[in-house]
Amino acid sequence: MSLTVFFTAIVSAMLINNVILMQFLGICPFLGVSKKSKSAIGMSGAVLFVMVIASFVTYTLYDLVLYEYNIPYISTIAFILVIASLVQFVEMVMKRYSQSLYKSLGIYLPLITTNCAILGVSEANITAIWGESVPYLDGVFQAVSTSIGTGLGFGLVIFAFSSIREKLEANNVPKAWKGVPVSLVVAGIMSLAFFGLTGII
Amino acid sequence: MVGIALVIGLVLIFIGTYALNKSTPPPELDETIDKEACNACKNFACAYKEK
């Protein structure tokens, strides 16, 4: 556990292996909740929270229970149930304290349950970080660091994309390109830009 | 057996959080504001609700 590991994991997960633009996970909320910056920020906060807690819980569950009792084959089911419970909790808190955000996120809030980015990060933590010789604390620290970076990367991209989409709404876009087509072109260009960051670490 | 118990436990936790979520009422922010009363009192709560 060190600051170097922490920052390397964050920069790597946020910029180099960006979950949306490099791994193509979490495309549904990326396209669905990026019409307004406010909704994008709210969604990013909810995803970051669920992702970090889910990574901690799933890594702990795998290391201390699934591996110990030789039942790693139920890891996907267990991870989905953990994520689903966390999403219900976040939805409850949001419903209670921020109705405007709750309404603006709409159907995408419960859909965090099926956001493959969160399950993908949980699974990637096991395949890439977990090992028999890796001490539990080191592993969980790296898993949480990676999930923070991934969540921040998700937020960075979805916020930048929503800002561009807001600008596009006010601009004179050809009729055939309005809406989704021009958004997908923007997403492609953003992906190319992030591809240029490969190899900085 | 441990696997079955684990899955059942996680399902029960999910059902618990789902029930709590469904029973949580959303805050009522769209209540009708009495303009005259707000102008009379000029308190923070009125200004907040008007937003």
Image (spheres, helix red, strand yellow):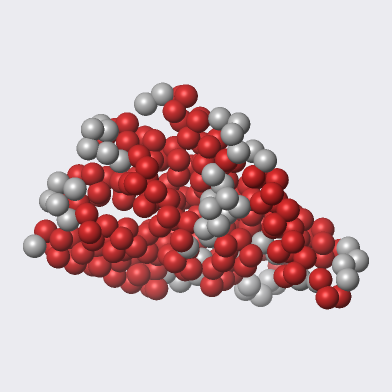
Q: Name above or below for residue A149 compared with residue B10.
A: above
* A195 or B48: nearer the viewer: A195
Q: Residue at x 81, y 71 (%)?
A: A177
How many numbered markers are drawn? 0
In this orientation, does residue B13 appear?
no
Q: Position of residue A53 (x, y in %)?
A: 39, 48
Q: Nearer the viewer, residue A190 or A156?
A: A190
Q: Is residue A80 visible?
A: yes
Q: At which x and y percent is residue B9? A: 20, 63
Answer left or right for B50 relative to A111. Answer: right
- Write down the quadrant of residue B42 in the picture: bottom right
Front residue of A101 and A59: A59
Residue nearer the viewer, B34 or A3: A3
For the N terminus of chain A, the quadrant is: top left
Residue appearing at x 42%, y 55% in the figure: A120
Q: x, y (%) of residue A43?
A: 57, 58
